[in-house]
Image (cartoon, rainbow, N blue to C red):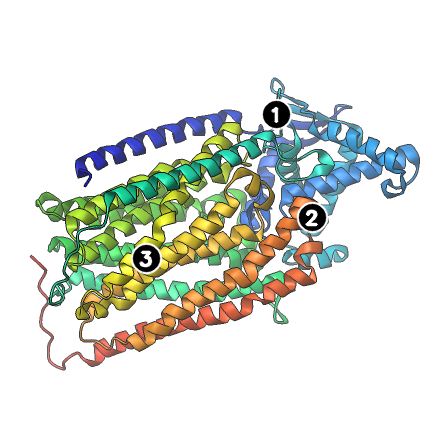
Amino acid sequence: MINSKKLWLWLGAIFILSFSVLGLIGREIYVQAPPVPETVAIADGSTLFSKSDIQSGREVWQTLGGMQLGSVWGHGGYVAPDWGADWLHREATTLLEIWAQKEEGTSFARLPPEDQAALKERLKTELRTNSYNPKTGAIVISKDRAEAITRVRAHYAKLFSSDPALRSLRVDYAIPERSLTNDQDRQQLGAFFFWTAWTSVTQRPDDVISYTNNWPHEPLVGNVPSASLGMWSIASVLFLIAGVGFLTWYQARKGEEEHLEAPATDPLIDHKPTPSMRAAIKYFYTAIGLFLAQVVLGAITAHYAVEGQDFYGIAISDIIPYALTRTWHTQLGIFWIATAWLATGLYVAPLLSGHEPKFQRLGVNILWAALLVVVLGSFAGEWMAIQQKLGHGTNFWFGHMGYEFVDLGRFWAILLFAGLMIWLTLVGRALWPALKTPSESRGLIGMVFISTICIGLFFGAALTWGRHSSLSMIEYFRWWVVHLWVEGFFEVFATAVIALIFAGLGLVRARAANIAVIFSTAVFLTGGILGTLHHLYFSGTTTPVIAWGAMFSALEVVPLSLLGVEALHNYRMSKAAPWVETYKWSILFFVAVSFWNLVGAGILGFAINPPISLYYVQGLNLTASHGHAALFGVYGMLGIGLMLFCLRTAFRGASWSDAFLKPVFWMLNLGLAAMVFLSLVPAGLYQAYHSITNSFWYARSPEIIHSSTMETLVWMRVPGDIIFSIGAIILALFMVRLLIGVRARRPATRPAIVQPAE
């Protein structure tokens, strides 16, 4: 067996080296980010846009919901267009039409094929040539192109007003009427959309690819995959095969773990929750409430893909438009899962150490109140932002940040970071006695403690950008939050806690579990840290990001290849002794985590991760299928499993009912599977076909999004959504029944005082 000290050294080296490379690449992204010009000038010397117009336009876009209403660089919602891709296509076709009318006196469609081909080649030269002057900060464009830009800008100004001519398009895009009330805002929004399109087609200085590595796919303007996309995709597949081969060899060489007889009785049967542990239980009820709200908002958001501005004929977009319901839906996913995990830390820490620090219960209660303030305050700010009730500066602090998964305004993000620091302090002070005491479990407790520190600190990446920071750098740090904070260190924390649970129940040896957790964490972080870069292929970054991201995101899949073994191992532990039946459904949710990790993160994740694959499907429903299967399938199931374990140890004599939990388990899993494989995956494949054979713009156009095929696939979500929702409701009823049962069993006389564990 590998020495745990060597594994810790290996883990430390991986951590330091990976973040060193990630930091160097961050510097590369900062230096090579697409410039925001001081002016966009016409050849005759007049100014079309200023830098202020572009920056203010981005702030206007944020107040609309940003990435929740359509997407930019492929990141965001799926009903409205990707605004850069949409602008690029409109500008290109408008310019072709201007040339045809001026030079041939007819429409472009009526020109002979050879004349069309000549104008298309001219178009590529016109749009791809980089006229940015770094000394003056000016982009100079032709008079004809300026005319095309002016026409496209007018289109967007009408789109975000209440112009009746574009009402049907607003319905297709799920944009409410008169979403922008200020004409200047509408004009500046167009300046930002122009800039995103400009970055996607304009070639980098002394290069043949655009600032976004020729994304999106748009053959009309010469945006086709670069050679590096294909080469690094092939290399990533080879790297994946090599990694799986090594891990399989290692597992075979290690051999079977020594069998451990389960204890005759439950080691935790006499456990008495401390006051702070009981106080932490309210977090689980809060998490379920947030989960139910997410389910309701998810149904409304999905339905907007069909009706656009209504919900079964009820006009609701003026009050809670698509951008808002999607904002709350995605944000609630993070909030409720994080709440369940934070509660697990608060509950398990005194259980592990047998120590109840002074004022721990007060701290747990204060943190819970702070959590509610952040949730309700950020939701109110986002509503006010989308209703155009906040100025740009106020919006940045209290409104809608506009970036998916980190939508909450800076003030609320600071409060959330402060809350995580409080959580870190509460968990750390409860764990500290166990860390100081030599034991077989100390390594596992140390891993829980380290992951707790990382969870507390890494959300700080959401505080790194300002109002006018480079969009490339914002994307860089945003994915630190989404990939490293949510998907990375929370998973390390959960892995260590699960191992401690099994060790505490006497089902595995603590020393073996410690080594297994350190090894799996090292393997996971080997790919996981630098794998963050696969989200940034087309965010104004250079080829090295593609190289590093492709190779290390492939390594992320390596540990997932053996999750079937882990699932079988966990299932067998549920049968280890009759008393283990007490924790059956908690363990089965851990088994479900392994399944969805393999399917959602592994299969569906790697289906889109190679650069050549993501080039065609980023921003399509294949991305959503991976997101749903991985986020809820892995982290949601894990949160529920941890919650059930904590509640089972807290309420031994209460009205616990496995009859409730059985349908919960199967309905959540089957409902999620139906949602993903009957709707999202087929819809994503349908869009991918049109993205590959035509263009990305076309795959996101109303012709495809509102085609009979796509709308049928949206309705195919309904069976899975219903099954899933029933499972969520039964889980909530189980929680209510549990609470009622506890209160009913309380004696009429003064209850005995629960003493803190020593």
Residue position marked by numbered label 2 in the rendering: 698
Q: In the rendered structure, which amino acid carries the disc numbered 2?
A: Tyr
Q: In the rendered structure, which amino acid carries the disc numbered 1?
A: Arg
The answer to whether residue 249 is above or below residue 661 is: above
Q: Which mark is residue 567?
A: 3
Q: Quadrant location of residue 85? A: top right
Q: Which mark is residue 438?
A: none
Question: How far apart, in angstroms, are the residues tagged by discs 1 and 3?
Answer: 48 Å
Q: Position of residue 478 (x, y in %)?
A: 45, 41
Nearer to the camera, 430 or 255: 255
Question: How far apart, in angstroms, are the residues tagged by discs 2 and 1?
Answer: 25 Å
The residue at the far left in this view is: 758
Q: In the rendered structure, which amino acid carries the disc numbered 3?
A: Ala
The residue at the far top in this view is: 135
Instruction: Judge left or right: residue 140 versus residue 428.
Output: right
Nearer to the camera, 574 or 123: 574
Instruction: Judge left or right: residue 327 versus residue 180.
Output: left
Disc 1 versus disc 3: nearer the observer: 3
Nearer to the camera, 544 or 428: 544
Quadrant containing the N terminus in the rendered view: top left
**Residue at 37% from the left image edge and 40% from the top image edge:** 245
Disc 3 versus disc 2: nearer the observer: 3
N-terminal-most mark, 2 or 1: 1
Q: Which mark is residue 204?
A: 1
N-terminal-most mark, 3 or 2: 3
Circle 1 SS class: loop
Q: Position of residue 133 (x, y in %)?
A: 64, 20
Question: How far apart, in angstroms, are the residues tagged by discs 3 and 2?
Answer: 41 Å
Task: State yes or no: discs 1 and 3 in contact (Cβ < 8 Å).
Answer: no
